[in-house]
Amino acid sequence: MELDKKMLEEGEVFSPRFNKDGLILAISQEEKTGEVLMAAYMNQEALQETVKTGRAVFYSRSRGKLWRKGEQSGHFQKVRKIFTDCDQDCLLLKVEIDQGQCHVGYKSCFYREVLDDKSLKISDEKVYDPKEAYSKTNGESGKQS
Amino acid sequence: MELDKKMLEEGEVFSPRFNKDGLILAISQEEKTGEVLMAAYMNQEALQETVKTGRAVFYSRSRGKLWRKGEQSGHFQKVRKIFTDCDQDCLLLKVEIDQGQCHVGYKSCFYREVLDDKSLKISDEKVYDPKEAYSKTNGESGKQS
């Protein structure tokens, strides 16, 4: 049942609106520092597993399956709080991480600033060696968008 | 020309990857506090106008046109910095806002926490009256997802 606009926006019933592909956007933010870490999609199963386990689980569109963040690298996201936006088509996860979480080796995926001349400036330093992290499990490195 | 993975992820060339609908995700975060405000999409034109004017411009999928944030409510987002993520399919805008920016009246669109029982708890207070803000311009209120 579709909630009416008032209920959707101001009500107290969680009614996540998955898109036509069955996905909802989820943004991970480090609770402690407020740093935005990454954005990815969840399907219903990923959201359920996230709530149940307290670890962020996304849905990999490129691989067509659940993406248990940290399963390969060991860098899990412990989900402390979940927020929904006004029209409930986007989630914000307040998470705790051990170290980095971007597969390139940075803490956040947003490690480059776009400058006026359209060049990118690296604005952060790597916090772990992705080669080492991913070799532990023979996992496949790379962002699973 | 598609950049190779290494260049895309570690290079210094801004090469935003718009999806098949010509859109890229953009997250707005208040620069001063780190608060995540909203997430929406941009097309190439919206991104260009954002860079040129320094004010956040999105693309409204529901209305099929540019969405100049604040045009109706007066609550603009001044874009101070733009970051791109590892595979350049998501942008993070560090913005300055005057007051609120969510059309419901809150500062951030993420004003409700999802509790364990799937109910929502309002975790913020309204900072402006949307009826008043939107009536100024006879604009249409509502999130333009």
Image: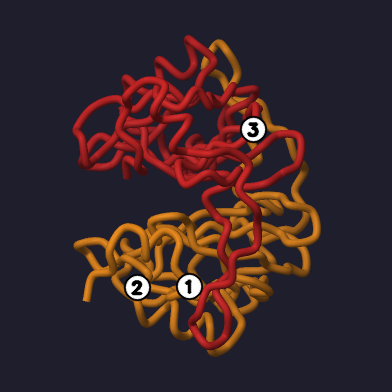
Chain colours: A red, B orange
Question: On residue B98, which mark appears?
Answer: none
Badge 1 amino acid: Glu
Badge 3 amino acid: Gln
Q: Residue at x 60, y 48 (%)?
A: A126
From the image, tell me which residue sits under label 3.
A99
From the image, tell me which residue sits under label 2.
B43
Question: On residue B12, which mark appears?
Answer: 1
User: Can you give x and y, in whole percent of width and height, for residue B131 in the image?
Assistant: 64, 61
Mark 1 and mark 3, same subunit? Answer: no
Residue A123 location, quadrant? bottom right
**Chain of the residue under label 2:** B
Q: How many labels does the image show?
A: 3
Q: How crowded is mark 3: few (under 14 residues within 10 Å), some or many (20 or more)?
A: some
**Chain of the residue under label 1:** B
Reply above or below: B135 against B45: above
Mark 1 falls on what kind of element? Answer: loop
